[in-house]
Image (cartoon, rainbow, N blue to C red):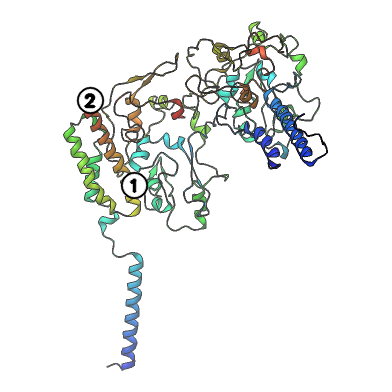
Amino acid sequence: MFNAKFKATIVTVLLFIGLVGLCSVRAMGGPQSSAAQAEPAKETWQKEFDDVCSKTQDAMTFSQKELTDLIRRCDALQPQIEKLDESRKKVYMGRLRKCRGLYVYVLDAKRNEKK
Amino acid sequence: MSMFSMQKGTRKNERRLLLLVLAFGVLLLGNITSAQIYLPKSPPEPSEYGKVILDNYSTAGPGAVVFDHWLHRSKFTCRVCHVDVGFAMEAKATGISASTNRQGFHCGACHDGKKLFEGKPIFAACSDAANDQQCDRCHSLGKKGVRKYEYRKFTAKFPKGIYAVNWEAAEKSGVIKPVDFVEGLSVKKAPMQSREDFALKAGYSWVHPIDFSHEKHSIWNGCELCHPEIFPSAPKGTIHFSMFSNIEGRYCGACHGKVAFPLNNCRGCHGGAPLWAP
Amino acid sequence: MNKKIFIALPLILVFCGSAPSQTGVKKKRPLPYEYGRVIIDNYSDKANLAPVVFEHWIHRSMFTCRVCHVDVGFAMKAGATGITAADNARGYYCGTCHNGKNVVDGKTVFQACSRKVNLEDEKRCVRCHSYGQKVASDFDFFKFSQPLPKERFGNGLDWEKSEELGLIKPASFLEGVSSSKGNAFVVQKDFALNPKVEGMPDIIFSHKKHTVWNGCELCHPDIFMGVKRGTVKYSMVDIS
C-alpha cells in the first residue's frame, strides 16, 4: 500500500518515540510501587535491631543468661549492618556499639556483684 | 693576680680580661633582669590603681573605655560582676562589644536604662536612643571633665591603708555596703560552708607565712570566682604558688596585682613581715 | 668557647620564666546564649561553606539528650560523628528531622543539605552554615528564655525546673528512628560521692534524674566505664 520510503519514515519515527520514552522513564527512576511511596517497609535486620536495642531501659532487670543472649544477637547483627550503604552503616554501627556496650557493661556489673 | 702573667699586653691576657669582663657583665645583667621579675613593680597613683582600659573595637568609634574599679567596688562584691555577669579577668578575654551591652549582657546587665540603683535608673550603656547617649561617661580615655565621679572626693571618707583605700576596714565600718545580689541577674543560692583559715609557708625561712582566710575572700568572691579556674583542685603542695607567678598575674596575682591591693603590700598577706620590708 | 654563648645564655635565662600559662587566670564565662555552642567543621571549609554553628538550647527544649545522642547517633566529641552533607540529604543525622517534610508546631522543618542546590537555597544553607556570618535566627534566646526559671551558669536556665513546670516538654521518642519508648528505666537508687577536699559536701548523684533525659547507653560504658563503685576516681581536673 505504502511505498518503501513512507514505511521507513514510520519505522524511524516509531523508533525515535520509543527511544525518547525509554530515556524519560529511566530519568524518572522507573515504575514506583505504591508501597515505596508510603513509609518504606522495615527490613528484617532493622526489625531485629529494634527488638534487641529497645530493651536497654530494662537492662538492669535481665538475668546474666538473658544479657548474654542479647549480646549474641547484637554480634549477629553486625555483619548485616556492615553491608549497608555508607550513611546507614555509620549510623547503625554507632547505635549497635552503644547498645551492645550497655549490655556488656550491665553483665559485667552483675558478675562483679556476685563476687 | 695569678691569671695574668707579668706581661699584661699579650693577646692571651687580653682574651682573659675580656672573658672576665663578659662574665661579670652577664652576672650583672642576670641580676638586674631577675630583680625586675622578682620584685613587684611599684603600683600607680591610688586613683589609677585598678584602672582598666577596654579597647577591643573603640578605635573605630567613640574611643577607648576607661573602667575604674574603685567606684563599682564600693557598690558591689567582686562576685556579682565576675561570676554573675561573667567578666573575665584578663585583657581582651571577655569580648564585650556595644552589641552585647545592648542585648543586656556585660555592662548592659545593669546599665540598661531600667534597673534602679539608689532609686535612680542606671544609664544605658551603648544606647541607640539619640536623646539618651552618655557615651563619654565610659569612652573617656584622653577626655577631660566627662566622668561623673572623682576619686578623691568619692573616697574622702573611706579609711585609708598604707597605700590607698583599706576596703576591708571600709566595709567593716559600714562606709561601703557592697551588694552581692542583683535582682534579675543573680540567682539566690544557699551559702556553702567556708573552709577554716590556714597558713601557707613561704619558700624562704625569713619570710613570715601567709595567713590565708577563706572566709574573708568568699564574702566578696563566693567560691566560683577562684575555683577551679584560678585555683584548680589539686592535692596540697602540688601547685607551687610563688611571687614569680603572682607578679605574672596568675593565682593570687590575678586579683592582688592590679585590683585588690598591690603585691608591694607585703604585710597584707605575710602578716608580721621582717623589719626591712615595706 | 663560642662568643655567641655569652649572648644566648642570659637571654635563655631571662625568657625561661615566662612560659605561657593555663591555670591561675580567670577566663570569661560564656554568655547564656553561647553556652552549648558547637562548631561543626568537618568538610564545610573544603566545600566553601561557612562552618556549621549548632546551639544546643533550642533543641534541648524540644528533645531529650537520648534522642539525638543515642537514637539519631550523634557523638559527644568534636569531629567524632563525621556528619557529611550526603548523610543529611539521605535522611540521617540532622536530616533525620530536617528533611523538608516533618511538621513541627505547624511549620515544616527545613531540609538540611539537599542533593541539588541552586541559588535560592542559599538562605536555607546559611541557617546552619553561619559561623562568622550575620544570620537572623528564627528563634531568639531572650524571648525563649524569658518565661523559664533561671539558674546560675550555663544558659542561665533551670532546665530541670522548666520541665517540672511543664514549660518545656522534651520528646523522648522519634517515630521510625527510636527503638524504645524509653520511659520507665530501672535504675539504681541515688547514692553519694564523697569528695576528697575537706569541707566540701557530698555529691548526691541521681540515676533517675539522669536517665530521664539520657537513657543508659549514652553514658555507659563510653563515658562511665567503672563497674565496681569506688574503683574509678573522678577528679575536678578530669572533669574540666
Q: Quadrant of residue B274?
A: top right
Image location of residue A44, percent across then percent down: 21, 50
| Residue highlighted by disc 2 | A113
Q: Nearer the viewer, residue C88 or A40?
A: C88
Rendered residue at 44%/16% (across/down): C200
Task: Return the residue found at the far top.
Answer: B173
Relative placement, left or right, of B112 versus A32 is: right
Q: Which mark is residue A91?
A: 1
Q: Position of residue C177 (x, y in %)?
A: 31, 44
Q: Residues within 10 Å of mark 2 (few under 14, many from 20)?
A: few
CA separation in Å, label 1 and label 2: 33 Å
Name the chain under label 1. A
Q: Amino acid at mark 2?
A: Glu
Give the farthest residue toward the left: A65
Residue C137 shown left or right of residue C206 in the figure? right
Q: Position of residue B6 (x, y in %)?
A: 81, 34
Label drawn at residue A70: none
